Image (cartoon, rainbow, N blue to C red):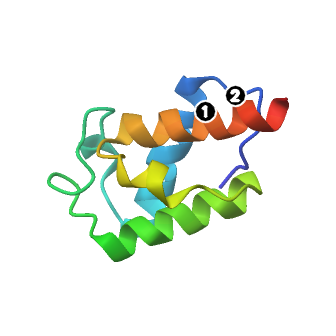
Amino acid sequence: MNTLNNKMSKDEIYIWVVDMLHEMFELEKSKITPQSNLYTELDIDSIDAVDIVVKMNQITGKRLNPDVFRAVRTVQDVVNVLAQLLAEEAK
């Protein structure tokens, strides 16, 4: 899996997120869309969500605020959170 960098577009981050979900949870890439709800459509549970946060922390080198991730519901929300983290890294 490629690492993320602060020059990536949201489209590139989305592709990375799809790859991550596929690798971590064996989800079919074709079933993952920006609007996919992590919990109701992709069967991600709270423990899986913690694993996603840990992976995001490792990849970005930043500590994601758990309160921020509690508001995440869709794949696009994950992309937006990552884009924000990477933008902060660029400052």
Label 2 crowding class (10 Å Cα cut-off): few <14, some 14-19, many 20+?
Answer: few
What residue is pinned by disc 2?
Answer: 8
Q: Work out whether residue 15 or residue 35 is closer to the camera in this orientation and state it.
A: 35
Label 1 crowding class (10 Å Cα cut-off): few <14, some 14-19, many 20+?
Answer: many
What residue is drawn where x is 58% and y is 41%?
82
What residue is drawn where x is 37% and y is 71%?
48
State whether residue 54 is above or below residue 69: below
Q: Which element carries disc 1, helix, strand or loop?
A: helix
What residue is drawn where x is 48% and y is 71%?
51
Along the horizontal axis of the image, is 74 left or right of 19?
Answer: left
Does the CB distance between marks 2 and 1 fall below 8 Å?
yes
Residue closest to the far right? 91
Q: Which element carries disc 2, helix, strand or loop?
A: loop
Where is residue 91, by image quadrant?
A: top right
Horizontal and vertical percent position of residue 32: 30, 43
What residue is pinned by disc 1?
Answer: 83
Badge number at residue 29: none
Where is residue 67, by image quadrant?
A: bottom left
Q: How many marks?
A: 2
Look at label 2 and name its amino acid.
Answer: Met
What residue is drawn where x is 60% and y is 33%?
83
Quadrant where the N terminus sits is bottom right
